[in-house]
Structure formats: structure tokens, C-alpha cells
Amino acid sequence: MSSIIEDLIARKIFNNRGEETIEVDVITTSGFGRASAPAGKSRGKAEVAYYPQGGVDQALKAIDDLVAPELAGLNADFQEEIDNILHEIDGTTNFKVIGGNTAFAVSIANAEAAANSHNLLLFQFLGGNTANTLPYPLGNTISGGQHTRGKAPDIQEFLALPHGAETFLEAATANAQIHKRIGELLKKKDKLFSGGKSSEGAWIANIGNLDAFEIIAKACEEVANELDFECGFGVDVAAASMWNAKEKKYVYQRDNKKMDTGAHLEFLLNLIEKYHLVYVEDAFDEEDFESFSELTKKTKKCLICGDDLFTTNNERLNYGIKLNAANSIIIKVNQIGTLTDASETIGNAQSHGYTTVMSHRSGDTCDWHIAQLAVAYKCPIIKTGIVEGARIAKINELVRIEHFLGNRAKMADLNI
Ligand code: PGA
Ligand code: ZN
């Protein structure tokens, strides 16, 4: 079996929003890997550039002219070497020349091709024999903020986390039932609710922030009672998108409320206590590490997670570790570019006790690799939505991995 790269083919495809994105095939002597890149809408400022100035077309040209000739003849098994070459070809710190999504698609397709060349699944190839732990699915049920237009909650995501489930399939079943139950509750609350959904398949409804808390709490409680295991929930506040830097206030338009940082901290602490929230992502503006640290200090059983805060960037994570800011981190490989960069951040996070959450993007394709990566890198949580094609592609891949592992499969230890 040989993993020598014979060819690299790139094409333009579409994500679930109909936006153009890049797909890459890596062909080795005895294997094949294909990966496509996702796109965020509420992006962190410190993320790498997605594409060069000329967009996807220029990225395709960069692959043909610069990347493919350099990688041809190399061994796909050496991921770090491949990823270093991508950095060298680009020459900037944030992939401005070839594009972060270009690097992402090449990097993941290469890893997949290497695994395939050895007749292994990606999680086995990267994680070895000890990769037998399934993550809990953190699923978006109600959308708000930048993922909606107009009259919806300001908080971006209301997320179910069925942490009492004993298998991944049970957990995914709980999430599907919670999502469905919320749809029924929304219809009861608002006769005009028409069943609209966001890119992530979460409901879009004309309700206030606190209404959304009441509805998800009721749905989780009912489904937990029916299935007989605990179903918690949490939120992605995506607070950077509400932060008015001039006024130094968080603006909740739907509720006609403005809060300074202290008031926002109190507001969130009350919600965590009242609803026993198990997860709060991006609670403050992405440069306010100190407030993340405050919130982390003042909570016990709740994961305080950084997404825009860290942007999967090891330097930003190091700064967070110093300040004890957050105890959990979102991992989006395309925020940083390559698999090697992301795996360094994951390793650093895990060795400092941070719960790693492998994540989709709001604009995504049916690429299922993050499911494999979550198992390979032992991430206890995967954030990937509940319904909608691009989300189901990842959920079903995890169902397959659990099935494949049989009685070796176990669920992650969440400690919440
Ligand atoms: P995205 O946001 O639109 O950048 O993917 C998702 C998130 O904030 O977690
Ligand atoms: Zn987020």
C-alpha cells in the first residue's frame, strides 16, 4: 500500500446556502480522499482569510499552479509536512494568498487519502486503537442573532445537550425529539409560526430571548422524562455581534434592552442558575478575555466555551489559559486552516482541562469529516445541528462509527 500523492484536483461546489465553496480530491497510489470547506456567518475577527481576493476561482487556480505541483510525489502519511508546505506556499500568517478554506480542503482531503491508502477510516488512522469514544451531540434548536433576519431572539443559538444518554444513537434520538417538540411548542405559542428554519436547521420564530429559554427548557424536560435520561441545554450567545463598542453595551434589540459588561455577567449568571444551563458559548465580546475569566470563576457545572474568543488559534488559547478564561473551546478547523494547526490547539486545550467541542459552520456541505475528527481527537462534544442535510451528514457518520465500533464504543465523560 502506498500513500504517494499522484494528483490533486480542485473544483467549485456549493454549500447549503447556495454559496460557492471549494472541494478537493487527493489521489494517492492506492487511495483517495475528498473534502469540501464550510463557511461561517458570525465569524471571529481573528479567523484566517477564507479565500484570496479573487474568491473561489482564484483559490482553484492557486491549487493548480502552486499547491498541486508541490505536493505531487510526496507521501500523504506525513500530514505535518503537507500542512507546513501549505503555510510555506502561502507565506502569510493568515492564508491570504491561497485562502484558509483552500488549505482546509487540501489538508483534510490529504488526511482522508492517507487513511484510505491504508484501508483505515480517518478516526482510526489519526486516533489509533484508543479512539473509541463517541462525542455528545450539541444540537441547535432555535436560531437568533446573525443567523436570522428580523424578529427572532438576539441570542444566536439555543442548544440541546442530552448528556445522560448512554449511546450516541440515543443522544441523537433525544435531540431529534427535542427539536420536533420545540416546533410544536412554537406553533402553540404563535399561530403565525410557519415552521421557518435557519441554515443550521434550527427554528426561526418571532419570540423573545426569555420565551426561547422557557420553550427549550420545557421540551428538554418532557423528552428527558419520556426517554428516562438527562437532557440539558445551553446557548451560543455570540455576544461579539451584540457588542456596541462605542456605548460599551450589549444590545438586545428584541427585548429592547442594553447592558454594560457587569449587567451582562449578572444576566447570564441568573440564566445559568435558573435553567441549570450546561453550556454557554461566547458570552462576551471576543476581545474581553477578562469577563470570560470572571464568568468561569463564578460557575461550577457549566461549560464556558470560547468560539470567536479563540478562533481555534493556539496563541489566543494560550492567552486564555493564562487568565483562566473559559473551560471549553470550539474547534473549527477552517478558522485556523490546517489539520496540524487545529490538532495542536486541541492538544493544548485538552492538556489544560478544556473541553473541546468539534464544530460545523452555519454554511456547510455534506462533508462528514468533523464526525471522524471528533472521535479521532477525543472531543467530548460535537456541535453540528440536528436536522438539515449538512448536519445529518455528520450525525449519521457518527451513528456509523458507533455501529462500526460495536461493543468497544463508549460515550465521552462530560463531567457536568
Ligand atoms: P458561524 O457561527 O456562522 O460562524 O458558523 C456558528 C457559531 O457561532 O458557532
Ligand atoms: Zn459560536
Image (cartoon, helix red, strand yellow):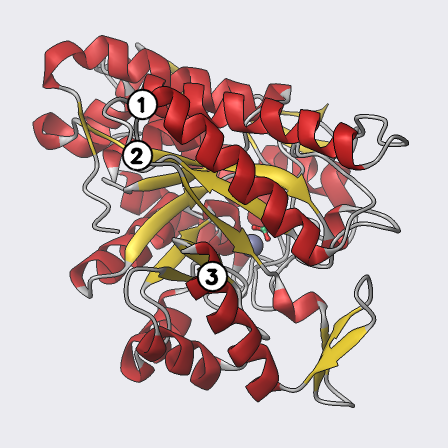
Residue placed under numbered mark 3 in the picture: 274
Q: Residue at x 9, y 31 (%)?
A: 130
Foreground tag (3 vs 1): 3
Number of numbered markers? 3
**Residue type indicated by callout 3:** Lys
- Of badges 2 and 3, the one in the foreground is 3
Name the side, left or right, on which 161 lies relative to 262.
left
CB atoms of marks 1 and 2 within 8 Å: yes
Cα distance, mark 3 to mark 1? 28 Å
Please identify the quarter of the rendering in which residue 190 is found.
top right
Marks 3 and 2: in contact by CB < 8 Å? no
* Ligand 2 within 8 Å, label 3 CB: no
- Report which residue position mark 2 lands on: 135
**Local crowd at mark 1 within 10 Å, few (<14), some, or many (≥20)?**
many
The x, y position of residue 25, in whole percent, is 51, 21
Q: Nearer the viewer, residue 244 or 1?
A: 244
Q: Which residue is mark 1?
A: 168
Instruction: Tell me the crowding category of disc 2: few under 14, some 14 to 19, or many 20 or more residues within 10 angstroms, Cα based.
Output: many
- Residue 388 at x, y = what percent? 64, 22
Determine which quarter of the picture holds residue 48. Answer: bottom right
**Among numbered discs 2 and 3, the one appearing first in the sequence:** 2
- On screen, residue 69 above or below 117: below
Q: Amino acid at mark 2?
A: Pro
Question: Which residue is nearer to you in this view: 369 or 218?
Answer: 218
What numbered label is drawn on residue 59? Answer: none
x, y percentage for residue 351? 17, 61
Q: Which quarter of the picture shows residue 355?
A: bottom left
Callout 2: SS: loop
